[in-house]
Image (cartoon, rainbow, N blue to C red):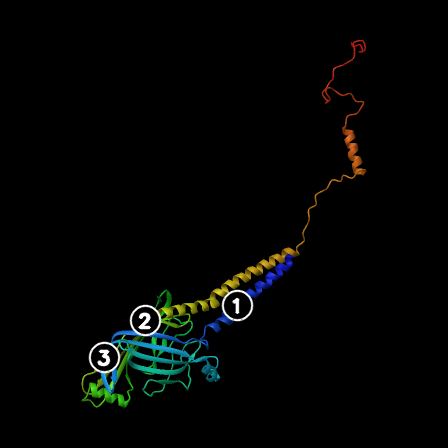
Amino acid sequence: MKRIVGAALFGLGVLLVVAAVGLPLYVAPLVSQLPYDLERSESVAEAADAEFLQIKAGAANVERGGLRSTVEVVPLAKTTDEKMTGDLKGKAVVWDVFQSVRRIDNDEIISEYSTELAIDRVSGAAAKWDPAWLDDGTGQPANYAGQVYKFPFGTEKKDYPVFDREIRKTVPAQFKEVTEVRGVEVYRFEQTVPEAQLVVADSSLKVLLARFAPGATTARLMYTNTRSFWVEPVTGSYVDVRDQPRKVLVPDVGTPTVLLNADFRYNEATVKSSADRAADNAQSIQVVRLWGPIVLGVLGLLAIVGGMLLVLRGSGKQTAVVEPVEEKRGGSHRADRDGEAAESDAPKPDAPKSDADSTEPTMPDQRSAAERPATL
């Protein structure tokens, strides 16, 4: 029985060890990538007391007040299945992204854009995909590259190229520190976009010059930005983001005019949901990548050792210790010997018994004096 149980335990241990090896090699890569059926998500960032350009009924004005930026990511599973072919098949997913910036006080639209792009499922960077497009009113090609809406799975403490939509180029985001956001460990990166000239449509430029520099014949729209990203490193997801854009109209004649100066930051609801989602996903990945293999490996080794011990004990020879049993059969030779020994030890009938040896009580002599033998 021990051999059967030991063999079964040994086999179970081997299976556990194989599973421990297979989890990080085969299962972990499957969970450490963007799924096709990822749920849509929404992030909201707000800027208080911002300066911004608002054009209404063909008239441009610089206003001051609170702004709300909403970014909605919509994964397209069907489009991914149909359009991710060749080298991109199974390696990238297609997302639609919509952003709108509105006034907080009256919900009036200030700016908006929409785009469709391919994202590498592991690195989170933009994949080279010709059908990608970006509609922000400038008419420029998308030219996506680098990190766009997330960082890689397994983000490292190093610099990453992050795409800037305004200049259509990547700018390094430098690793700064390890910190925490709502109890979640995150890496903080900082990106500084150097001053660059933006492309402005002729029709829009005429409106701006007429309002802010009537004596000028042309102008440059200069742009700079500073961004901070708080990234959960296991998943590469944004937990918090700060965006500080600045745009200045610089005419060839006249005084420069600030058209945008804002400090956007994820609101509390977005930070909380982002932190909770990132923590849950990171825990699931860590179970498959680290803790699962460790637990299964230890249990497997214990089962193997225990099974081997049971098999060895079950196959070993067992020696029974038999105590001598005294036979008590009537009429046997041994019984005769025992009887003879008993008789030899007993006192002889004819042998006189001493008073000391007698164990019987002494009775008084009941005979008369005449009947008693004479004594000397």
Residue sitting nearer the eye, 304 or 215: 215
Dot 2 crowding, Cα within 10 Å, few <14, some 14–19, many 20+: some
- Asked if residue 209 is positioned above or below residue 305 in the image, the reply reads below
Find residue 228 and report its horizontal and vertical position in percent: 32, 73
Residue sitting nearer the eye, 297 or 49: 49
Q: For the residue labelled by badge 2, is the local secondary structure a helix, a strand or a loop?
A: loop
Q: Residue at x 50, y 71 (%)?
A: 27
Q: Amino acid at mark 1?
A: Val
Circle nearer the N terminus (3, 1): 1
Q: For the residue labelled by badge 1, is the local secondary structure a helix, a strand or a loop?
A: helix
Q: Residue furthest front?
A: 106
Circle nearer the N terminus (2, 3): 3
Locate residue 285: give its quadrant: bottom left
| Quadrant of the rendering where the C terminus is positioned | top right
Q: Nearer the viewer, mark 2 or mark 1?
A: 2
The answer to whether residue 79 shows anywhere in this view is yes
Q: Is residue 21 left or right of residue 49?
A: right
Find residue 271 and report its horizontal and vertical position in percent: 35, 70
- Tell me the residue that label 2 is attached to: 267
Question: Which numbered marker is on residue 63?
Answer: 3
The answer to whether residue 147 shows anywhere in this view is no
Disc 3/disc 1 C-alpha distance (Å): 61 Å
- Asked if residue 342 is positioned above or below residue 65 in the image, the reply reads above
Find residue 345 and report its horizontal and vertical position in percent: 76, 29
Q: Residue at x 52, y 66 (%)?
A: 20
- Asked if residue 24 is positioned above or below residue 246 in the image, the reply reads above
Circles 2, 1 touching at the beta carbon (< 8 Å): no
